[in-house]
Image (spheres, coloured by chain):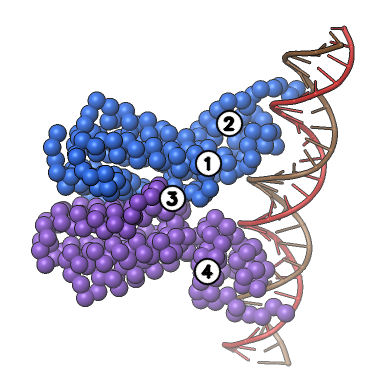
Chain colours: A blue, B purple, C brown, D red
Amino acid sequence: MGNKLRLGGDVIRDAAVELVREIGLGNLTINLLAEKLGVRPPSLYNHLSGIKELQEKVAAFSLQCLEVAVRDAAVGKSGAEALLRIAEAYRKFALENSELYKSMLLFPGSADSNVKEAGMAVARIIYQVLERYGLSEEDQSHYARGFRSLVHGFVSLEEVGFFKSGDRDKSFRLLVKGFISTLGARE
Amino acid sequence: MGNKLRLGGDVIRDAAVELVREIGLGNLTINLLAEKLGVRPPSLYNHLSGIKELQEKVAAFSLQCLEVAVRDAAVGKSGAEALLRIAEAYRKFALENSELYKSMLLFPGSADSNVKEAGMAVARIIYQVLERYGLSEEDQSHYARGFRSLVHGFVSLEEVGFFKSGDRDKSFRLLVKGFISTLGARE
DNA sequence: ATATTAGACTAATCTAATTAGTTTGACAAG
DNA sequence: CTTGTCAAACTAATTAGATTAGTCTAATAT
């Protein structure tokens, strides 16, 4: 009956991610995950400490995906163009993976280190691109925060539905370009 | 035994808000709320459809508080000063009421209209302040979104812990002032 | 006085998380 | 081979929480 080795590696995390995509972050449960994996719920506790850890795994994975998307967007580009591409890629990821995007934010936030680490990785990319602008180190940090705040703020308010009508794409492009131009544009 | 009229008006919502402040959004349960109110859990169902509605009430109330804080900050001010005060008040509210602030975002988001309506109210204040700048109606909308995105993005990333060290107050002030100056400052 | 009714109650059910304790099958050592 | 061990599955049971059904009581209006 009981086969073995079914739940090794990233199998659990990947199934959880898929489940979150299908049914939404708020509906992720141990029972459904076990069912999806063809296993009884308690079996998962051989691999997980509980649902909190599962949520953290999903969050960390989501941040890694976002990081990859953002990095890909910036590769071979620099300065204003890189920032624009990053912003577009960030927003695209958030809109196309809204449940995963939520998972990055709405969770414990406190204790976990993997999540925070992955969050920093995104910051680092922006920070790197800003190096081109010859800002002081301190300013580089301020503006990296600003860029991310603007982009993240926009997409998360957009997803909650706080931006009624009007051309959201246009708002986004205008704002990002506006921000970039305050950096003292030069390529 | 069973007294009456104990749960009228906003008693339930207020207790829920207090509970969220005390123990965090993620720990709000019907049982704890009933206990706090000195009542048995099922009694709450005479006043609520369930926990979803409770969460929505908390979210809507939080947005109303935020709106009041933001409006107070802007009263008697205009232009750049008003925007700066709004930003400071917004951030102060979020930092001092982080659990309530989360409730605004992390919830259903889809169906509820009270929540969305309260969210719009905050937008309207910003929109009004921007009237002074003589922007086209479309630009006014874009920049109102931008302002809110920047402020909300900053405080929510700050709360998740994505801004490691460094002077966060300074970053915030610098960024908000930078944004305001792109509007073409005039009083 | 008494009928109505809002609003509380008890009892019970359902779903989800989690723990305890048991079984099984792969594999290495005798 | 055949047996000890271990990981990883299992069943059974417990707990917490949301929710529903149906009962009781006290304030109020007739």
Disc 4: host chain:
B
Three-letter residue code for mark 3: Val
Q: Residues within 10 Å of mark 1 (few under 14, many from 20)?
A: many
Upstream in sequence: badge 2 or badge 1: 2
Whether residue B99 is situated above or below residue B76 in the rendered picture: above
Residue identified by numbered label 3: B160
Quarter of the image for the C terminus of chain A: give it.
Answer: top left
Residue identified by numbered label 1: A56
Picture quarter containing residue A170? top left
Three-letter residue code for mark 4: Glu
Going 20% across and 46% down the picture, which residue do you hit? A179
Find residue B18 and name its label.
Answer: 4
Residue A135 placement (x, y as % from top left): 21, 43
Q: CA distance from mark 4 to mark 2?
A: 37 Å
Q: Are marks 2 and 3 on the same chain?
A: no
CB contact under 8 Å: marks 2 and 1: no
Q: CA distance from mark 1 to mark 4?
A: 27 Å
Label 4 element class: helix
Residue A138 placement (x, y as % from top left): 27, 47
Q: Residues within 10 Å of mark 4 (few under 14, many from 20)?
A: some
Residue B153 placement (x, y as % from top left): 33, 51
Residue identified by numbered label 2: A12
